[in-house]
Image: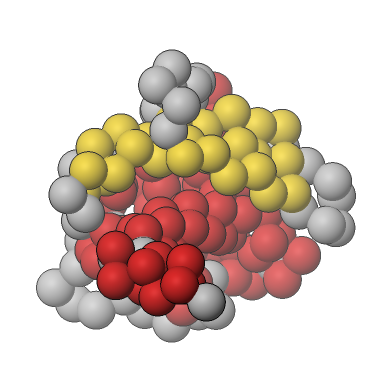
Amino acid sequence: MSSNRQLDTLYRQVIMDHYKNPRNRGKIDDGSLTIHLNNPTCGDTISLQLQIEDDIVKNVKFIGEGCSISLSSASMMTQAIKGKSIEEALKLSKVFSEFMQGIAPPDDLDLGDIEALQGVCKFPARIKCATLAWKAMEKAIEEKTNEVSVSDSHCGCEMKENESK
Ligand code: FES
């Protein structure tokens, strides 16, 4: 077997392992931030829950319906961002998005199991499958960040000013 074929086989095994034994599948019970997204081309869905404390992804879980690429990518994404800062998670998401366009990750960044999805960039229709969970993660972080800045901007002075009008 050529080394390329061996690598393809290994990558397929990694993808199927995440598909059949998804990491972080399920729900977080404490009402953490939940984002629902769907893939408009097929209608498949993901619900992603993020628990963020002090800008760190303390916990992350997902449930969803989808193909092997979408669910394995969700599993890999949750594995990769758990315990990371939101800045690191967003950076990884950017690298992953570029990876799906055929752009190699920086040399100092080890993608781990995510490497197994490198073949997806050759199939444009599947890129949306692979990026669904990552978009959900970006949206969840965006909502969390907006939530914090909105509550920060509501200081007592502003409220008093409005009340006096
Ligand atoms: Fe629906 Fe891949 S075919 S997410």
Give the color scheme: rainbow, by chain, secondary structure or one colour.
secondary structure
Tell me residue 139's x, y (percent): 52, 59
In the image, taking residue 75 as reference, residue 57 lies left or right, namely left
Looking at the image, which is closer to me, 58 or 162? 162
Residue at the spot x=71%, y=32% of the render? Answer: 65
Residue at the spot x=64%, y=71% of the render? Answer: 122
Tell me residue 141's x, y (percent): 41, 57
Most extreme residue toward the bottom is: 103
Number of numbered callouts drawn = 0
In the image, taking residue 164 as reference, residue 122 lies left or right, namely right
Residue at the spot x=22%, y=43% of the render? Answer: 53
Tell me residue 131's x, y (percent): 58, 59
Residue at the spot x=40%, y=66% of the render? Answer: 159
User: Image quadrant of residue 41?
Assistant: bottom right
In the image, taking residue 28 as reference, residue 52 lies left or right, namely left
Regarding residue 87, the answer to whether it shows in the image is yes
Most extreme residue toward the front is: 164
User: Image quadrant of residue 109?
Assistant: bottom left
Regarding residue 16, the answer to whether it shows in the image is no
Q: Is residue 84 above or below residue 127?
A: above
Q: Is residue 93 above or below residue 161?
A: above
Looking at the image, which is closer to me, 68 or 147? 147
In the image, taking residue 97 as reference, residue 125 lies left or right, namely right
Tell me residue 40's x, y (percent): 83, 57
Q: Is residue 89 above or below residue 42?
A: below
